[in-house]
Image (spheres, grey):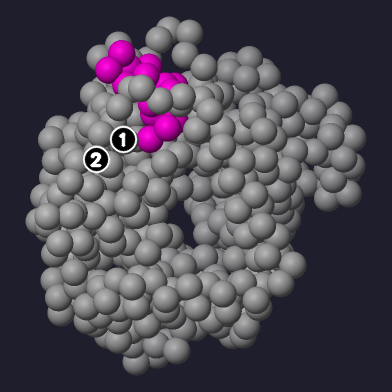
């Protein structure tokens, strides 16, 4: 029997965002990369990570390659960082000739765009654990290599396309993620005693702004794409994190929706309460899968914050454009449960959606005012590749042929000018507070106030550029100060965060 050759894999992870102001967001832990590393190491291979929180020079990149001496350079990339991956893959070939692989969301959704690029030998489509393991095992056998499932190859100018391997149906079969691949202690989240965790993959829903439905359709077995670790395995995984990093006091579940499998969720919450209720957590939930008893159990388990995608306060937009068929009544009832059991809430909202205008955005503002969330996130709609919402915008003619996809505002709509969209995003939270005041006052005062503020928000007669500019300066100072506080004095930040949550709860009550 031929002895298996030990391979060295260097995973290059460009984990940063650069906007026009050159603002960089620090990187964080990736469960997928940690899982790939665990599988490769379990099977005798060596793995190292180049975790890039900002773009490096060619000299520094090549120096890293020469130090690591890998057999394979595997890039994991989002669409936003792909331009840097193209550049680094060329550097790799020019200077070392090392075999290059590109994986991640961009490679999975846009393999045709990736495989033809100079410097890229192979593209991995879908989950990478076992496909990359097979590639490592076959690297010296070209005939077998070119038949590796889930890979497209570009060898000597010839492109070979293989079928995608079925996804891993039982997540319990995977080894514990290789968290030590990362410098976990240096993460911004770790400084505030929080671990980013995931106990599932995929999502059962097909919201138009999300690529989950496209991701599951790349597999030959799309049914059952949303999977969870068993409740027992999930809790063991979380306990392992606490053993490794005893300073952790919070979990932030980054699963698409922690409660999308209601039977699993009920079992998990019971087990979590028994084993880990001293570790408080935040998570994302689907509101039409909730009842009061579930929220009560969440509180008992240690849930302190729930993230909810509202996106739009206009029911017609939610149903026909976003494919989110929840009524205002369902949303408001769920938030009443969160307030009753003193669980903080965060809402995600979008402005500038296809077919939206300033009056429909006002409905989103007013819905948030009635919901009384503790935190609000407002983003401008961006047409991500391979999402149904991008297709909707294209079909409506809202995405010009010369669209600037490096801009934060790509969708151009005659009924919703750019200046109004930027204004709506900038002043969204301010008007939520105004309407909360109006709704709290007696009707003979509150109703006229509501009408006045509705007019102020929707009127076209204001210096949009000036008021948006003033707001931007304020937010830049505020968020910059917050980030400095988190980095320099994390204990003070945690104390202030807890104090703020308590004060907001009192106001809501």
In magenta stretch: residue 423: yes
**In the image, what residue occupies the spot 79% across and 28% down?**
91
Judging by the rendered image, the residue that carries numbered circle 2 is 452
What secondary structure is marked by label 1? helix
Residue 386 x %, y %: 37, 28
Residue 99 x %, y %: 71, 35
**In the image, what residue occupies the spot 87% across and 40% down?**
60
Looking at the rendered image, the quarter that the C terminus falls into is bottom left
In the picture provided, is 332 more to the left or to the right than 178? left
Residue 183 x %, y %: 71, 64
Closer to the camera in the image, 404 or 37:
404
In the picture provided, is 396 more to the left or to the right than 501? left
Residue 227 can be seen, yes or no = no
- Which of the 4 quarters of the picture holds residue 325? top left
Closer to the camera in the image, 36 or 479:
479
Residue 154 can be seen, yes or no = yes
- Which of the 4 quarters of the picture holds residue 266? bottom left
Closer to the camera in the image, 324 or 180:
324
What secondary structure is marked by label 2? helix
Specify the label residue 456 is tagged with.
1
Return the residue found at the far front: 444
Residue 89, above or below 167: above
Q: How crowded is mark 2: few (under 14 residues within 10 Å), some or many (20 or more)?
A: few
**In the image, what residue occupies the spot 38% across and 43% down?**
428
In the picture provided, is 236 more to the left or to the right than 362? right
In magenta stretch: residue 482: no
Magenta region: 409-424
Residue 402 x %, y %: 48, 8
Tags 2 and 1 in contact by the CB under 8 Å rule?
yes
């Amino acid at each position: 029997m031929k002895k298996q050759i030990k391979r060295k894999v260097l995973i290059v992870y460009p984990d940063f965002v650069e906007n026009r102001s050159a603002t960089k967001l620090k990187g964080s832990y990736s469960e997928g990369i940690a899982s790939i590393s665990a599988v490769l190491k379990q099977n005798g291979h060596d793995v190292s990570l180049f975790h890039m929180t900002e773009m490096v020079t060619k000299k520094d990149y090549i120096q890293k390659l020469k130090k690591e001496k890998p057999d394979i350079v595997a890039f994991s990339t989002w669409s936003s960082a792909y331009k840097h991956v193209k550049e680094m893959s060329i550097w790799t070939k020019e200077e070392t000739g090392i075999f290059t692989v590109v994986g991640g969301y961009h490679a999975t959704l846009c393999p045709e765009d990736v495989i033809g690029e100079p410097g890229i030998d192979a593209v991995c489509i879908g989950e990478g654990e076992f496909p990359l393991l097979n590639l490592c095992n076959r690297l010296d056998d070209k005939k077998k290599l070119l038949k590796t499932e889930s890979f497209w190859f570009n060898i000597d100018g010839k492109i070979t396309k293989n079928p995608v391997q079925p996804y891993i149906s039982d997540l319990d079969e995977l080894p514990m993620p290789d968290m030590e691949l990362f410098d976990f202690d240096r993460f911004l989240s770790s400084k505030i005693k929080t671990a980013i965790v995931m106990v599932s993959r995929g999502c059962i829903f097909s919201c138009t702004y999300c690529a989950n439905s496209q991701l599951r359709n790349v597999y030959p077995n799309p049914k059952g794409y949303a999977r969870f670790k068993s409740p027992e395995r999930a809790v063991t995984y979380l306990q392992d994190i606490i053993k490794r990093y005893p300073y952790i006091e919070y979990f932030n579940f980054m699963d698409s929706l922690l409660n999308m499998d209601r039977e699993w969720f009920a079992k998990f919450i019971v087990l979590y309460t028994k084993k880990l209720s001293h570790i408080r957590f935040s998570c994302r939930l689907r509101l039409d899968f909730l009842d009061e008893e579930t929220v009560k159990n969440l509180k008992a388990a240690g849930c302190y914050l729930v993230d909810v995608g509202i996106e739009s306060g206009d029911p017609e937009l939610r149903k026909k454009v976003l494919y989110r068929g929840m009524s205002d009544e369902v949303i408001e009832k769920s938030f009443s449960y969160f307030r009753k059991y003193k669980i903080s809430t965060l809402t995600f909202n979008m402005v500038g959606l296809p077919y939206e205008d300033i009056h429909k955005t006002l409905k989103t503002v007013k819905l948030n005012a009635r919901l009384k969330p503790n935190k609000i996130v407002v983003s401008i709609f961006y047409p991500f590749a391979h999402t149904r919402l991008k297709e909707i915008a294209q079909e409506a003619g809202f995405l010009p042929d010369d669209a600037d996809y490096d801009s934060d505002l790509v969708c151009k709509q005659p009924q919703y000018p750019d200046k109004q969209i930027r204004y709506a995003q900038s002043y969204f939270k301010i008007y939520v507070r105004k309407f909360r005041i109006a709704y709290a006052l007696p009707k003979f005062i509150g109703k006229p106030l509501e009408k006045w503020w509705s007019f102020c928000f929707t009127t076209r007669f204001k210096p949009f550029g000036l008021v948006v500019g003033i707001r931007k300066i304020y937010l830049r100072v505020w968020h910059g100060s917050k980030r400095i506080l988190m980095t320099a004095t994390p204990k003070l930040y945690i104390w202030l965060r807890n104090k703020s949550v308590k004060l907001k709860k009192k106001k809501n009550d």
